[in-house]
Amino acid sequence: MVETRLATSADAGDVARLLRDFNTEFDDVVPEQGELAERMSGLIAGGDTSVLLVGDGPDGIAVLRFRQAIWAAGLECYLAELYVAPDHRGSGLGRALMTAAIEHARTRGAAWMDLGTSEDDVAARALYESLGFSNREGDGGPIQFFYERDL
């Protein structure tokens, strides 16, 4: 069994390293290491963000954001980031992170979890779908779309 753990503000350096590696791998803009570590430390301490880590490095990360739901008494949980370092992919770390993330969200009182991923990230989509996530409205309804815009 692969063990995961909940990050604390003291883990902010590792959290920032993994997030920087993730964004660098996909050629996305990323803040400087110290700035990102400070930001993540504050988010973790603030209580509306939970970060799960896996592996000795650590080698993988899941970032969960919580907020009050409109349509349910529980919280909404958004999986903001899921990343496993390339050398550790295929070893069950992603599944362990997602399983722990779902359980953590339930424990926090979340009514559901949502996430976004790209169409070409076939491995992530297969993982999410194997865990019961759907990109369809209701049972077999139309495909759902996730939009974003820089402000």
Image (cartoon, rainbow, N blue to C red):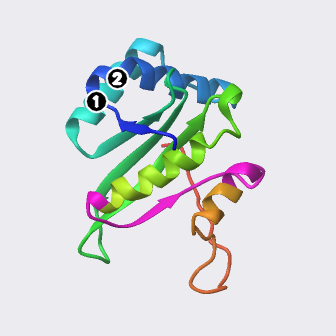
Give x and y (percent) for residue 145: 63, 66
Dot 1 corresponds to which residue?
8
Label 2 neighbourhood size at 10 Å, few (<14), some (14-19), many (20+)?
some
Spot occupied by residue 113 in the image (x, y as percentages of width and height): 44, 62
Q: Is residue 78 above or below residue 151?
A: below
Determine crowd level at label 1: few under 14, some 14-19, many 20+ residues with C-alpha closer than 10 A: some
- Looking at the rendering, the stretch of residues picked out in magenta corresponds to 107-125
At numbered mark 2, what does the secondary structure look like: helix, strand or loop?
Answer: helix
Of residues 29 and 149, the one drawn nearer to the viewer in this rendering: 29
Which residue is at the far front? 1
Residue positioned 43% across, 58% down in the render: 102
Q: Position of residue 96 (x, y in %)?
A: 52, 46
- Kind of residue indicated by mark 1: Thr
Residue that appears at 32% across and 53% down: 66
- Quadrant in which residue 25 is drawn: top right
Q: Is residue 82 left or right of residue 106?
A: right
Q: Are marks 1 and 2 in contact (CB under 8 Å)?
A: yes
- Residue 42 in which image quadrant: top left
Left or right: where does residue 34 sit relative to residue 73? right
Q: Residue at x 60, y 34 (%)?
A: 84
Q: Is residue 73 inside the magenta stretch?
A: no
* Residue beneath disc 2: 11
Say whether residue 20 is visible. Answer: yes
Q: How far from the left and from the top, in percent, is residue 99?
A: 48, 54
Q: Is residue 32 above or below residue 140?
A: above
Residue type (three-letter) at the residue carrying disc 2: Asp
User: Residue at image x 51%, y 40%?
Assistant: 2
Q: Is residue 27 visible?
A: no
